[in-house]
Amino acid sequence: MPIVAQTEKFFPLKGWGEVLAQSVRSSDELLAALELHLENLGNGLSAARQFPVLVPRPFVERMRKGDPRDPLLLQVLPLAAEDQLAAGFTVDPLGEQSTNVETGVIHKYHGRVLLLAASGCAVNCRYCFRRHFPYNENRLGRSQWQSALEYIAQDASIAEVILSGGDPLMLQDERLAELVEQIATIPHVQRLRVHSRLPVVIVQRLTEQLTDILTRTRLRSTLVLHVNHPNELTPEHAQRLALLRQAGVTLLNQTVLLKGVNDSAEVLIELSEQLFNHHLLPYYLHVLDRVQGAQHFDVSSSEAYALYQQMLAQLPGYLVPKLVREEAGQPHKTPLHAF
Ligand SMILES: *Cc1c(COP(=O)(O)O)cnc(C)c1O
Ligand code: SF4
C-alpha cells in the first residue's frame, strides 16, 4: 500500500480548533515564515503588546514569501505606525461602549440586534474597530445569554438576530446550536444572521454541523463572511460554501476598504468576481472606522467614491457592494455620496 494513503488514513484533515491552536502568535514568527526581516517594516512591538498577533497558518500560507507589501500580511502585522495618534481616530469610534453592552446586545438599528456571542477571534486584524473594545467585560456566559434573550423576547420589533463578537463562530457547534435553538423560540424573530471572518482564515470551520445548525431551524439564515482581498479565497472555500448554499443559506460578504490592501479598482473588481465564483455576493464595502491605531489604513471618502464609481462602470449591479460608513448615532449605515 502506498505510504501516502496510509498517512491520510491515520491523520485525517485537522479540525478547525487544532488549526487555530497552531496559529502564529508573534511578528518574528510571521516574518520568519515569510522570509522577511523586521528592519524593513518598522517595529510594531508596543502595538503587538496592546493587541497581540494572531494569524492561523493557512492564512500565512496564502501570503507571498519575501513581499513586505503582501495584502494579507499588511492586515495582520503590527507596525510602529499604529502607535501614532491622529485627529479624529478614537478608541470607540462607533460609541458602542454606551449601547447596551451590559446584556451582550447592541441594539442600534430598527428590527435587528447584534448579539456578542463570543469574545475572541481567530485572527487579529490590525484595522479592527474592536481592537480597544473591553471584550472581557462583555463575554456572554450562559446567564448573560439568558438576559440577552430576554431583552430580545421583550421587544417585538426585533425580527432579526445577528450573531457577532468577536467572532461568533469561535463558539463550538454544540453551543452555537443551543443558542440558535433558544433564539428560535422567540416567536417574533424571523431571521438569523452570522457575521464571521473565521471560515476565511480557517476553512475547516465550515463544518457539516454548521450547515445543519443554519438550516434545521425555522429561522431564515444568512452567513456574512468578511473577505478583503481575492487572495484570501481558495478552492476549498468554493466547495464548502457550495454545500451551504445548496442547503439554503444566503451567503454574503463584507469588505473593509484598506489602503495598501484593496484600494484599487482592479483589486476590488477582481474581489467581486472571485466572491461570486465562491458563491458569495458582495454586500457592503465599508470605509474604515476611525479607530486609533488604524489611521495608516485610511482611504479618503473621495478616493473611496471614485473606486466605487469604477466598480459601477465595470461590474453587473449585483456584484457592486454598497459603499457605506458607520456613523455613531445614525439609524443605519450611511451610504457615501459624490462630493
Ligand atoms: C452593521 C450593524 C447591523 C447590521 O446592519 P445591516 O445594515 O442590517 O447589515 C446591526 N447592528 C449593528 C450595531 C451594526 O453595527
Ligand atoms: S472582529 Fe473581525 S475584523 Fe475584528 S479582529 Fe475579529 S475577525 Fe478581525
Image (cartoon, rainbow, N blue to C red):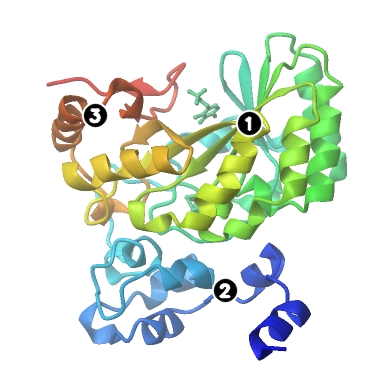
Which residue in the structure is indicated by mark 3? 315
Q: Quadrant of residue 219?
A: top right
Q: Neighbour class for label 1 at 10 Å: few (<14), some, many (≥20)?
A: some
From this view, report whether residue 34 is shown above or below residue 232: below
Under tag 2, what secondary structure? loop
Of callouts 1 and 2, the N-terminal one: 2
Q: Nearer the viewer, mark 1 or mark 2?
A: 1
- Horizontal and vertical percent for residue 265? 18, 41
Hey, what amino acid is under mark 3? Leu
Q: Neighbour class for label 3 at 10 Å: few (<14), some, many (≥20)?
A: some
Which residue in the structure is indicated by mark 2? 23
**Given contact means CB atoms under 8 Å apart, are the residues at marks 3 and 2 in contact?**
no
Please state, as top left, top right, bottom left or bottom right, where the N terminus lies in the image: bottom right
Between residues 206 and 322, which one lies in front from this camera angle?
206
Q: Nearer the viewer, mark 3 or mark 2?
A: 3
Report the residue at 12% width, 21% height from top.
339
Mark 3 and mark 1: Cα distance apart in space: 24 Å
Of callouts 3 and 1, the N-terminal one: 1
From this view, report whether residue 187 is shown above or below residue 167: above
From this view, report whether residue 143 is shown above or below residue 19: above
Q: Quadrant of residue 44?
A: bottom left
- Taking the image as shown, residue 108 lies to the left or right of residue 44, namely right
- Horizontal and vertical percent for residue 68? 25, 74
- Horizontal and vertical percent for residue 77? 37, 69
Hey, what amino acid is under mark 2? Ser
Q: Neighbour class for label 2 at 10 Å: few (<14), some, many (≥20)?
A: some
Between residues 88 and 247, which one lies in front from this camera angle?
247
Mark 3 and mark 2: Cα distance apart in space: 36 Å
- Taking the image as shown, residue 252 lies to the left or right of residue 12, namely left
Which residue in the structure is indicated by mark 1? 249
Hey, what amino acid is under mark 1? Val
Under tag 3, what secondary structure? loop
